[in-house]
Image (cartoon, rainbow, N blue to C red):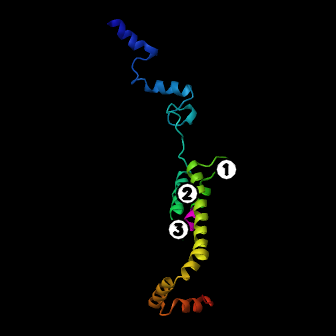
Amino acid sequence: MGNLDQQDNQRDGWENPRENWDKWQEEQKKKGWDRWNSNASNSSYYNQPTHKPYDQAFSIASLVLGLLSLTLGCCGISIPLGSLGILFAMLSYRKGKPMNSNSRFGLYTSVFGCVYGIVMIVYTLFVQLPVMLQDPAYVNQMNQLYQMLFGMDFEEFIQLYYGTGL
């Protein structure tokens, strides 16, 4: 029993590690490792990054706005949302570093959402609206609506504000 106690006390020249904290710190500094002021390659903390990822907020905002611009493509709001998504994706990009996957996907979805919004507006104005204006039931509904809102028929409204007739 006494032999085991001697071995425990003499292990690595340490009598009691709690009492020799200063000695342990000095040995660690000689090895070139300081627990509180180290870079990630010398750290024993599983090589965690020593800085916060700086582009996460913009890349996630770009991703969310890109997805919103895709889902709201049938509305007119997809173009401003897509352009904001493109802006945030570009703000998350840093020189010399590859673009984050969230910001890359946000950029793709934002561009596609903007294009989809423009296509929907052009389709509505130049394809869908002329077809609807040929339907007498739709024209009657528009006349009633414009009579309640503006006090004039739809054709009178177009003539007055746009200077052309249907």
The residue to which callout 2 is attached is 62
Q: In front of the other: label 1 or label 3?
A: 3
- Please identify the dominant SS of the magenta region: helix
The residue to which callout 3 is attached is 74
- At x 50% / y 62%, what residue is drawn? 71
Q: Secondary structure at mark 3?
A: loop
Q: Quadrant of the N terminus?
A: top left
Q: In front of the other: label 2 or label 3?
A: 3
Estimate the x, y position of residue 69 in percent, counting from the top left: 54, 63
Chain-order first, disc 1 or disc 3: 3
Q: Is residue 63 above or below residue 76?
A: above
Q: Amino acid at mark 2?
A: Ser
Estimate the x, y position of residue 155 in percent, counting from the top left: 55, 90
Estimate the x, y position of residue 86 in percent, counting from the top left: 60, 60
Which circle marks residue 95 in the picture? 1
Q: Secondary structure at mark 1?
A: loop
Q: Tell me the magenta residue range.
A: 77-84
